[in-house]
Amino acid sequence: MNRFRSSAFVLAALTAFPILAAPIDQAESIQKKTNQASVRSQKVIDKSASAAIELKASIERLREEVNNLEVYRHHLKTLIDSQNQEMTSLVQQISDIKETRQGIVPLMYHMIDGLKQIIAQDKPIKLAQRRERVEKLTALMGRADVSEAEKYRRILEAYQIEMDYGNKIATYQDDITTSDDVTREVDILYIGRLSLLARSLNHQAFWMWDMQSHQWINGDTAQLTRINQAFDLANQHIAPTLLDVPVSLAVTEAK
């Protein structure tokens, strides 16, 4: 009887085992699927988090670019405003230049005429050079390839040279025609515009310019020593000293 019960229990246990094993397998399968789903979900979460971080970084970069563009736009606006101001200034300057040019061109012609009058009324110091300079200035005025500023500069330069004749003591060689209608090659000395003297190349005779007759007249040979001294001083052959020479002044200049 006991043997029968034991056999029956074993048989019952063996019969029930498949029934219990099925739910366990099912649970393990569900757990496995759950784990797999969790892994997939975690991957999705990780991927989403990475995408979010990258998106945030992209947004920050875009914000920085927008800020840079704002700064650059402000810079361009400043440049454009400055260029507009410069353009306005240039337009005004061009207008002023046109007005100035209309006034300065006649002035330059008057200045050249003034040079001609100065030379005509002055002592004949380097007369040929001075006349040639005025002729060149007159020709220069008709040249389109020379700016008005350069023309004006050259005229002022000519006036400066004329002024320098009145402040210098110097000598040069030239031909003169004396009062007896004889042309001679001589050394010429000018002491500013006070005295204009000519001396023969052999130092034996001299002439002085007479402002009344506008001629070279014979000088007194008794003054030759003082005349030679004046030439030596002008040529820096002797130390500076007081000079006693005839002056070449008109009556109105001497007063």
Image (cartoon, rainbow, N blue to C red):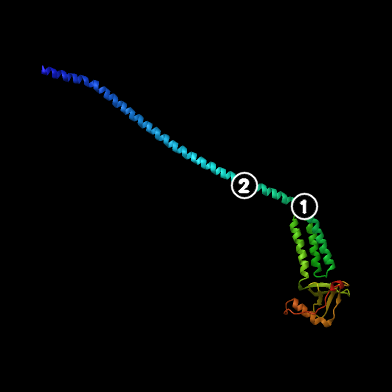
Location of residue 42 by image quarter: top left
Q: Can residue 142 be seen at all in this image of the molecule?
A: no
Distance CA(mark 2)–CA(mark 1): 32 Å
Residue displayed at 44% across by 36% down: 52
Q: Nearer the viewer, mark 2 or mark 1?
A: 2
Quadrant assignment for the C terminus: bottom right
The vertical placement of 65 against 175, above or below, is above
Q: Where residue 29 appears, x then y in whole percent? A: 30, 26
The amino acid type of the residue labelled 2 equals Thr
Does residue 154 appear anywhere in the picture? yes
SS of the residue under disc 1: helix
**Image spot of residue 90 (x, y percent):** 70, 50
Q: Residues within 10 Å of mark 2 (few under 14, many from 20)?
A: few
Q: Position of residue 158 (x, y in %)?
A: 77, 64
Amino acid marked by disc 1: Glu
Residue at image position (84%, 64%) is 117
Q: Which disc, if any, is residue 16?
A: none
Q: Is residue 4 above or below residue 75?
A: above
On the image, the x and y values in percent for residue 66 come to 54, 41
Which quadrant holds residue 106?
A: bottom right
Which residue was labeled with disc 1? 99
Q: Earlier in the sequence, mark 2 or mark 1?
A: 2
Residue at mark 2 = 78
Which secondary structure, mark 2? helix
